[in-house]
């Protein structure tokens, strides 16, 4: 499951995916993960007016499935897994061409499952998405810095309540900002702008 395959084809074992998700390898979890993959394969993503596609970075509307192909197979012999068991259930999926195009042009975000699952704050995931999206678009100041107006960031989240009061925004985002440092390794400064 590593890298960005140019053809969009990803092959993975259910056991390895369960390990990556931090779940135990019981029969119940195998069944839940297989059902989730099946639901994703049957789902349609509809984006109106805000889908950004590489290489032209135009915003448009799209309706597509995440996978253009999804096949489950069982290995005849299975492969030894890191946990000592034998992996026999594998999936071969092919990502939709719209997604593959964005990956090829480095217009995608890598999600760290451990960070997402361990974050307790409501806005942590959305903050990471916004930060990574801005880096991908090339909106950084220098090599490793993004600047936001807090009021604009609050609207992009969207933050509930008063999105124009800086002290309220900072109070509501305090846990998320702490987790950005602790889980995501991000550093931030709040600077008053006249």
Image (spheres, helix red, strand yellow):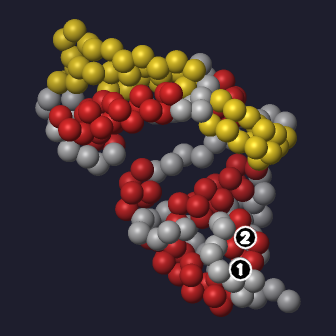
- Which residue is found at the position 36% from the left and 18% from the top? 72
Q: Which residue is mark 2?
A: 155
Pick the front one: 28 or 81: 28
Pick the front one: 155 or 20: 155
- Which residue is found at the position 70% from the left and 49% from the top? 136
Q: Quadrant of residue 73?
A: top left
Direction top: furthest residue: 76
Position of residue 42 in the picture relative to residue 105 (left or right): left
- Label 2 Cα neighbours within 10 Å, binned few <14 / some 14-19 / many ≥20: few
Q: Earlier in the sequence, mark 2 or mark 1?
A: 2
Position of residue 65 in the picture relative to residue 49 (left or right): left
> Secondary structure beneath disc 1?
loop
Screen quadrant of the C terminus: bottom right
Pick the front one: 101 or 40: 40
Screen quadrant of the N terminus: top left
| Residue 186 in view in this figure | yes
- Which residue is found at the position 57% from the left and 78% from the top? 173
Q: CA distance from mark 2 to mark 1?
A: 6 Å
Q: Position of residue 75 (x, y in %)?
A: 26, 13
Q: Which residue is mark 1?
A: 163
Q: Quadrant of residue 31?
A: top left
Q: Is 171 above or below relative to 110?
A: below
């Amino acid at each position: 499951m590593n890298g960005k395959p140019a053809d969009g084809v990803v092959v993975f074992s259910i056991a390895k995916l369960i390990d990556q998700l931090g779940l135990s390898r019981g029969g119940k979890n195998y069944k839940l993960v297989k059902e989730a993959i099946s639901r994703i394969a049957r789902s349609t993503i509809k984006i109106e007016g805000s889908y950004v596609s590489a290489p032209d970075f135009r915003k448009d509307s799209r309706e597509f499935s995440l996978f253009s192909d999804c096949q489950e197979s069982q290995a005849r012999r299975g492969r030894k897994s890191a946990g000592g068991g034998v992996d026999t259930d594998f999936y071969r999926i092919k990502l939709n061409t719209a997604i593959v195009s964005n990956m090829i042009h480095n217009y995608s975000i890598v999600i760290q499952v451990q960070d997402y699952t361990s974050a307790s704050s409501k806005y942590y995931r959305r903050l990471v998405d916004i930060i990574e999206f801005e880096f991908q678009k090339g909106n950084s100041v220098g090599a490793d810095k993004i600047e936001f107006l807090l009021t604009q960031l609050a609207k992009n989240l969207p933050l509930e309540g008063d999105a124009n009061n800086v002290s309220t925004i900072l109070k509501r985002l305090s846990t998320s900002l702490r987790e950005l440092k602790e889980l995501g390794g991000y550093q931030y400064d709040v600077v008053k702008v006249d």
